[in-house]
Image: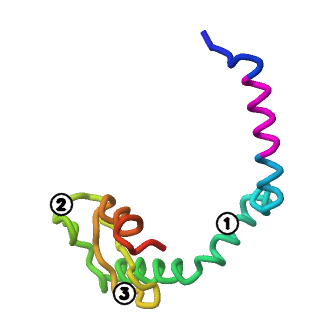
Amino acid sequence: MKVRMPLCKEKEMKKWQKKYKLKMKAEGKYNRGNRAAQSARYRQVRRIAVHAQRIAGYARKKGILVKPEVCSICGIKTNTIHAHHADYMKPLDVTWVCQFCHNWLHTIGGDAK
């Protein structure tokens, strides 16, 4: 059985949603177009990062970069080892890290991009 929100709360929520949408529209963050256009804008903003990732992927495919089985930070052996770029202008200079350490590098580790 589905429990409904009390009517007073439902009205309050709709009022808040309308206010939030107006705020987002004013900031230019709401309804920014279709998905393809959003993807194109994202790629344009991150084109240097994407370029470095593609070069590293190609180098790995050709055997120039070799993906290890262990994380270079914590030493754990896992199947999900990521290539972390500290500097996107050096696409072949990567640190091989597990998913946990990669998230740590981008948030707590001070390497936030």
CB contact under 8 Å: marks 3 and 2: no
- Residue placed under numbered mark 1 in the picture: 39
| Disc number placed over residue 19 in the picture, else none | none
Q: Where, by quadrant of the figure, is residue 2 drawn? A: top right
- Residue closer to the observer: 60 or 23: 23
Could you tell me which residue is drawn at 58 percent across and 77 percent down?
Answer: 46
Q: Amino acid at mark 2?
A: Ile
The amino acid beneath tag 3 is Leu
**Horizontal and vertical percent position of residue 18:** 82, 41
* Crowdedness near tag 3: few (<14), some (14–19) or many (≥20) residues, C-alpha within 10 Å: some
Q: From the image, tell me which residue sits under label 3.
A: 92
Secondary element at image label 1: helix
- Magenta span: 9-19
Badge 2 density bin: few <14, some 14–19, many ≥20, Cα 10 Å: few
Residue furthest to the bottom in view is 89
The residue that label 2 is drawn on is 76
Compute the Cα span from label 2 to label 1.
34 Å
Residue 18 colored magenta? yes
Residue 108: horizontal and vertical position, in percent? 36, 65
**Colour approach in the figure:** rainbow
Q: Position of residue 32 (x, y in %)?
A: 78, 60
For label 1, the crowd category at 10 Å Cα-Cα, with few meaning under 14, some 14 to 19 and many 20 or more, is few
